[in-house]
Image (spheres, rainbow, N blue to C red):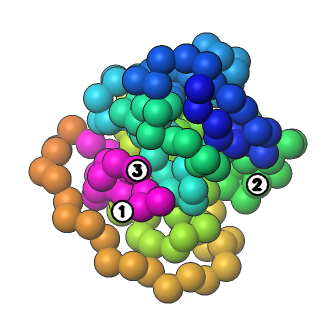
Amino acid sequence: MVKMTVNSEALDYRIDPATPLLWALREESNLTGTKYGCDDRRCGACTVIIDGQAVRSCVVTVGQLEGAQVTTIEGLSADGSHPAQQAWIAEQAVMCGFCEPGFIMATAALMQRGGDANSITNICHCGAQPRILKAIARALQSAAPIPSRPAPAEPDNSARLSLGSSEEEHGLPNR
Ligand code: FES
Ligand code: FES
């Protein structure tokens, strides 16, 4: 039994604590906006915000999250009015839309914490990358200015969207 708050709702997951958060969200809570892309932290389609940081939910287990505050795309805003969502709409940064929730959650976390757009390493498998980059830039411009923190070391992965590495790749935030 693991207690956490998901989208402002107190939840008690009575499942194997080794279950990845991604599957608890999708299968136990029917929060299917969080997508399954690669299962090994490459694509970022499963990105959610945990205690203020963007985290790949496919590599975090429920058992690691006792007391955590989790936000998924469904909890970002009730009506799509979050500035990151509005930036996506303004830039029409969608083709199939599969990558969109993860990118938006990574962007929303960056808006809260400050930092460099290059820290978002999510991947779009369609051709929406140029518009996604514009949407990220637009969203960050609309965020209140927060001092940037140094970006973490960048892994060499040429297949990625031409951005750098991200906090979520380094696992859970310090809690
Ligand atoms: S499903 Fe691709 S990073 Fe989690
Ligand atoms: S719009 Fe299809 S994967 Fe990004």
Foreground residue among 170 and 160: 170
Q: Is mark 1 within 8 Å of ligand 1?
A: no
Which residue carries the number 1 mark?
A: 118
Which residue carries the number 2 mark?
A: 82
Residue at the top extreme of this rendering: 27
The kind of secondary structure element at disc 3 is loop
Task: Residue 151: say if magenta.
Answer: no
Q: Is mark 2 within 8 Å of ligand 2?
A: no
Residue 31 appears at what percent x and percent y? 68, 24
**Does label 1 or label 3 sit earlier along the sequence?**
1
Identified by mark 3, the residue type is Leu
Local crowd size for mark 2, using a 10 Å CA cut-off: few (<14), some (14–19), many (≥20): some
Q: CA distance from mark 1 to mark 3?
A: 19 Å
Residue 23 appears at what percent x and percent y? 52, 20
The kind of secondary structure element at disc 1 is helix
Q: Quadrant of residue 7?
A: top right
Identified by mark 2, the residue type is His
Residue at (36, 33) in percent of width and height: 59
Asked if the residues shown at circle 1 and circle 3 are in contact, with their CB atoms under 8 angstroms apart, the answer is: no
Is 73 displayed left or right of 133 in the figure? right
Residue at (40, 23) in percent of width and height: 18
- Is there any visible trace of residue 39 in the rendered image? yes
Q: Which residues are magenta?
A: 160-175
Q: Quadrant of residue 124?
A: top left
Prevailing secondary structure of the magenta residues = loop
Q: CA distance from mark 1 to mark 2?
A: 21 Å
Which residue carries the number 3 mark?
A: 172
